Image: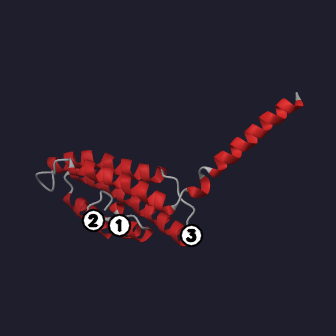
């Protein structure tokens, strides 16, 4: 009986050690960057498939933003869900700042959609200025993200 328990214990310990070696430290910054850029590339493809609005204000813009905002929100949620690599303190700080800026972008797109629905041109102009001043693209580039940091990406 003891031999059987010992064999089971040995198998469990071996399995636990194997599992511990399969993830953890092998997930690198390049893995994170590749996955993040894949998410951004996919969202960019979906965004480009949307028909652009015929006018920069009114019903057409509101309808366009009604389709764009869920894409931007989904992209941000997928990026936040990625496992973060064991980075240097500087890289961790950059990634934290990137996610904070990304949250601001998502909020700005929501406000832009609401303003377009109301026909509030002043708020739309203010939100567009805030989007243009947002450092999300430069933070993405600083961290090493390529697609997520381009001017064509949805989070810029």
Q: In this view, does 117 lie to the left or right of 43?
A: left
Q: Where is residue 29 in the image (x, y as percent from the top left)?
A: 50, 62
Q: On the rendered image, what quadrant is the C terminus found in?
A: bottom left
Closer to the N terminus: mark 1 or mark 3?
3
User: Closest to the observer: 87 or 5?
Assistant: 5
Q: What element carries label 2?
A: loop
Considering only vertical position in the picture, is 115 above or below 4? Answer: below
Front of the two marks 1 and 3: 3
Mark 2 sits on what residue? 151
Mark 1 sits on what residue? 137
User: Closest to the observer: 126 or 155?
Assistant: 155
Considering only vertical position in the picture, is 146 above or below 7? Answer: below
Which residue sits at x=32%, y=70%?
133
Query: Which of the 4 image quarters holds residue 104?
Result: bottom left
Q: Tell me how far mark 3 sits from mark 2, CA to CA.
A: 27 Å
Residue farthest right in this picture? 2
Mark 3 sits on what residue? 88
Badges 2 and 1: C-beta atoms under 8 Å apart? yes
Crowding near the residue tagged with mark 3, few <14, some 14–19, many ≥20 C-alpha atoms within 10 Å:
few
User: Closest to the observer: 106 or 137?
Assistant: 137
Crowding near the residue tagged with mark 1, few <14, some 14–19, many ≥20 C-alpha atoms within 10 Å:
many
Q: Tell me how far mark 2 sits from mark 1, CA to CA.
A: 7 Å
Q: Where is residue 40 in the image (x, y as percent from the top left)?
A: 34, 55
Q: Tell me how far mark 1 sits from mark 3, CA to CA.
A: 20 Å
Q: Is residue 84 left or right of residue 138?
A: right
């Amino acid at each position: 009986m003891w031999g059987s328990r010992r064999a089971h214990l040995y198998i469990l310990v071996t399995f636990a050690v194997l599992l511990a070696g399969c993830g953890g430290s092998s997930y690198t910054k390049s893995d994170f960057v590749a996955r993040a850029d894949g998410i951004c590339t996919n969202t960019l493809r979906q965004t480009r498939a949307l028909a652009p609005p015929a006018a920069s204000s009114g019903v057409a813009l509101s309808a366009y933003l009604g389709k764009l905002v869920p894409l931007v929100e989904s992209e941000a949620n997928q990026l936040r869900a990625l496992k973060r690599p064991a980075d240097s303190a500087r890289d961790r700080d950059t990634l934290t700042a990137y996610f904070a800026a990304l949250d601001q972008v998502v909020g700005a797109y929501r406000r832009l959609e609401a303003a377009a629905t109301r026909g509030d041109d002043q708020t739309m102009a203010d939100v567009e200025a805030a989007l243009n001043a947002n450092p999300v693209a430069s933070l993405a580039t600083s961290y090493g993200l390529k697609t997520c940091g381009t001017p064509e990406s949805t989070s810029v």
